[in-house]
Structure formats: C-alpha cells, structure tokens
Amino acid sequence: MSGKVLDELEKIRKQALADIERASERDFDDIRVKYLGRKSRLTEILKTLKDIPSEIKPKVGKTANDVRKDIENSLNKRSSIITGNSMAAKIETGSEDITKPGRTARLGSKHVITQTIEEIVEIFVGLGYRMVETGEVETDYYNFTALNTPEDHPARTLQATFYLEERAGCGDERTLLRTQTSPAQIRVMENSKPPLYVIVPGKVYRPDVPDPTHSPMFHQVEGFAVDKEITFGDLKGTLEAFCEKMFGAGRKVRFRPHFFPFTEPSAEVDVSCIVCGGKGCRVCSHTGWLEILGAGIIDPNVFEVVGYDPEEVSGFAFGMAPDRIAMLKYGITDIRMFFENDVRFLEQFK
Ligand code: PHE
C-alpha cells in the first residue's frame, strides 16, 4: 500500500512540474486548482493520512508535504520569471552569480579629426567668424567654373575629380564630389552681402590611390573674409594669430608664392615646425618649416561671378587640411590610420 501511494505522489510531482514548466501566466490558476485544490488527488491523500497504517504514515505524510511545497515553489518561481521578475528568480535559483564583477561600459570619444576640426573652427569663431557647412556633392560650376578655373585645367580631369553619373549636355550642371571646400565661397557670397567672415569645415574627395599621404577622402577647413579694404596684411595677421593659438606661442609663419585660380596673389603657407620649433628634425625634413595652408587674395573675377563690385570690396581666402595638421601634431605617419577605424589607434586620442 505505502509503495503505491509513494509512487503516485512521485507521479503527481513529475507531472505538475512538467505542466508548470510549460505554463503561461493564464494557466497558473488552473494548475493550482488541479494539483493543490480541495478536490485534487494530493489533498485527498493528505486528508486520508489518518487511515494509513502508522508504520508508514510519517513517510507518506512527509513525501506528500514535500510534493506540495515543491509544486508551490515552482509555481511561484515560474510566475516571477514570467512576470518580469526574472532576475530575482535567477538569483534565487543561483543561475545568476550576482557576485560576478560587472561589465565595464566602453566610453566612446570624438574622432581625432573631429577634435582637430573643432579646435580650428573654435579659434576662428573666437576671431568673429561664422561657421557654415555646404554639400559634398557639387556641380562643375561651383567647384571649378565660378572659382575661375579654366575649362582645360588639370584639376578637372577624371584623374583628379570623382564625377557622378554624366548626363548628356549638362555642362556646368555636371555633378561631382567636391575636390575642395572652396565652392562654399561662391555659395555663401551668392546668398549674402559683405562683410563676411566665414569658416567652412568638411569632407573633400580626390581619386588618389591610398598611400601614407593620400586618401581618396580627406578634410579641409576653408576660411574667407570679404570686407572693405581687406589686404594681404590682414591675411597674414589672421593666419599668424591662428598658428599661435593652434600650435603655441612663438610660431612663425612663412608665405611662398604659389598659384590658385581663384586667388591672386596666391601663397602656400608654412608654419615653423611644431615638433622642433624650427631647428630642423625628421618631421620637417630638416627644413624647420611645415606646409599647412593654401591662401591668397580673392580674385576679382570671383567677385564678379557673385555680383560683388571688386572696386568696393576685397577679401582673402585660405584652405587647410586638418588631417595633415593632426598627423603633424600627433606624429602620425600614415593618413590611412584615421579612416581604418581601428579602436586601438583611435583610443589614443580620448
Ligand atoms: N582649395 C585649395 C586647395 O584645395 C586651397 C585654397 C583655399 C587656396 C582657399 C586658396 C584659397 O588646394
């Protein structure tokens, strides 16, 4: 007799636990009634304990109570898991070790190029410049024609410019990825009147084969000023002030004659080496100077294109590559490092 009751109790336990395992929230009441209710087999067994022979009574009584507790516990556990209290349940069952050290969140940071651009822009904003951004897809007109660049200029070739799909007869409307931020000069001047003091950061594109000093995408920061009686001296003073703020006190600036279609005269601008201070080192190829900018006085032809009177206003413009500045500043010898997005490299600039 006792064997039979004990077997039955085990069967009840097994079946109840299996039902609970599969149960969803709305099954709980039914399960409770079925296994623990007044009319359940378990309750019946407990009620008839008194009729059981006294030698086996304790054993049957204990097992029946254990089964009851087991069913109650697993119902509670299952219900807390389902009702979103799963962490409590995990802790209770020991399946979650709450003494484990937590996962540390990795904090991101601004890309070193972004940091450099912001540094440059902030300096000019401090000098009264307004920041403007224009599009990376430009037309032939804004990237070249309006910037006084002749039809047969080498920069316009397929080797030097990424053209977008060509439509027959689109001429100046032909679209391309801007090769420089200078088209922003035209876009801003077209839409506003002097005085203008503007700084324009952005991405530019040229179909160069990637190597340590070339990347098909890089960045430029364009700056320009248009006002009454702006002179080359203003350009020089502005760039000197910028270099002091950007690279530290005592930096010297040197202008070398150069050519750009949209400035006349034009210059390439060097800063005394930011590593050796001008004594000569590997970074400056022992010259003491680093080339960081192109600049010049805005060509009267450009003013005519945007409807300004070159007799009334004058201006200067400059363009620099923050990628190059960051390379010099941090001693990076391969521009491609910036764009490979290797976190181990980027983390150094947090
Ligand atoms: N746009 C020129 C370049 O990409 C740089 C420049 C800007 C030169 C403004 C003069 C004035 O090389």
Image (cartoon, helix red, strand yellow):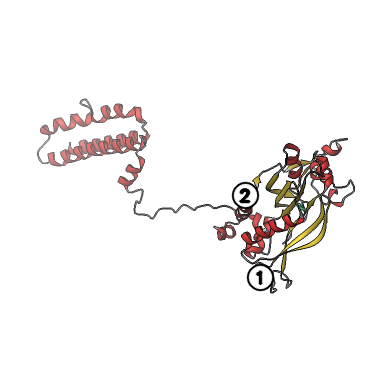
What amino acid is found at the position of numbered circle 1 in the picture? Gly
Q: Is residue 210 visible?
A: no
Q: Residue at x 17, y 41 (%)?
A: 62
Q: Is residue 277 left or right of residue 44?
A: right
Residue 53 image-quadrant placement: top left
Q: Nearer the viewer, residue 323 or 134?
A: 134
**Residue underneath mark 1:** 277
Q: Which mark is residue 124?
A: none
Q: Residue at x 37, y 54 (%)?
A: 100
- SS class of the residue under badge 2? helix
- In the displayed structure, would residue 252 be above or below residue 221? below
Q: Is residue 50 left or right of residue 131?
A: left
- Residue projecting furthest to the top: 39
Q: Is residue 41 visible?
A: yes
Whole-percent x, y for residue 179 in the image: 77, 49
Is there CB contact under 8 Å for labels 1 and 2?
no
Q: Residue at x 32, y 43 (%)?
A: 88
Whole-percent x, y for residue 230 in the image: 75, 50
- In the displayed structure, would residue 320 be above or below residue 45? below
Q: Residue at x 13, y 41 (%)?
A: 58
- Residue projecting furthest to the right: 152
**Residue underneath mark 2:** 125
